[in-house]
Amino acid sequence: MPEYNRTWLPQAEQFAGQCPAKQPETDAPWTPAQPIDGLDMSVTLAGMTMKNPIVVASGTFGFGREYGKLYDISRLGGICVKGLTPARREGNPAPRIAETPMGMLNSVGLQNPGVDAFIEHELPRLKDIDIRIIANISGNTPEDYGVMCEKLSAAGVDMIEVNISCPNVKAGGLAYGTRPELAAEVTEEAKKHSTVPVMVKLSPNVTDITEIARAVEGAGADAISLINTIRGMRIDLKTRRPILKMNTGGLSGPAVFPVAVRMVWEVANAVKVPVLGMGGVSNGRDAAEMMLAGATAVSVGAACFADPYAPVKTVDELAKIAAEQGLSHVSQLTGAVRPW
């Protein structure tokens, strides 16, 4: 493990031992499926073509090192790397993970080595893999986003995902993603300094997510991703204290899936830019459903902690579903829902 990485662990390692993981039932928990004749699995997201629509969500796959020991991650369409900040962050104090029925709460707090360390130590390895690289960034001022976009664009990532669920120190700590004008401001700054497509990740913790979606589209966003985690809380009955040290955290996993599908459908019908759908996606059926709601591509996140093979299984399952429905191109699923 590189020197810079010894005192902070990728999120996948942080969860190990804190959250019981589902163990593979056999020595070969996944066997790669053969390509299906006559089915094109490629999709294009804001000008970025991927071999298939499945991306791994930021914060659930680290920088791909751990999962790369289990399978060839180039079988995925893209990797959205661990959220990056201008400088190294140690994250929040433990406990910062809590199990919930059908999901999990986390308040990891964007622990990461910083954008410069990522560019120096992780990006060169990822660029040698046949996979699209999406850099997720978080900042506390619009200028933070501008600086990171400039560095990452020059370093050669394929796309930048802007996390607007961060507090804006110039607006009294109010999260960028909660007000259209704040979301637009950071989007404009990111676009000004980026030479690669900019995708804005929306928070579900708002009254009307389409209002935020329209604001970032108007500010120049090339794509929109959603949903981020839903704010939640658990309490220990014996101590009467919140289980998470930060009191609240972000809920992810299958429990949020219906909310995510609804919000993806609403946003896809409100904007013209493409959508990367996420939130509780665990398998190929979920991915197909998310695409029917309007997503061009789909991210698998928390499911990785229950089954590290979930992303590649999802690729194969989605291909089988598309073939069974007689499709020639998986993109024919996008937006094909038939509302009553």
Image: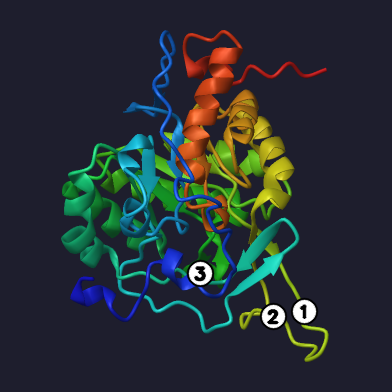
Mark 1 highlights which residue? 235
Locate the N terminus by quadrant. bottom left
Q: Amino acid at mark 3?
A: Phe
Badge 3 density bin: few <14, some 14–19, many ≥20, Cα 10 Å: some
Above or below residue 93? Residue 157 is above
Badge 2 density bin: few <14, some 14–19, many ≥20, Cα 10 Å: many
Q: Residue at x 32, y 81 (%)?
A: 7
Tags 2 and 1 in contact by the CB under 8 Å rule? yes
Residue 11 placement (x, y as % from top left):
44, 66
From the viewer's side, name the closer residue of 268 and 41.
Answer: 41
Residue 328 placement (x, y as % from top left):
48, 8
Q: Nearer the viewer, mark 1 or mark 3?
A: 3
Pick whichever of labels 3 and 2 is earlier in the sequence. 3
In whole angstroms, how far apart are the C-alphas of marks 3 and 2?
15 Å
Mark 2 highlights which residue? 243
From the viewer's side, name the closer residue of 217 and 254.
Answer: 254
From the viewer's side, name the closer residue of 8 and 44.
Answer: 8
Q: Residue at x 61, y 46 (%)?
A: 279
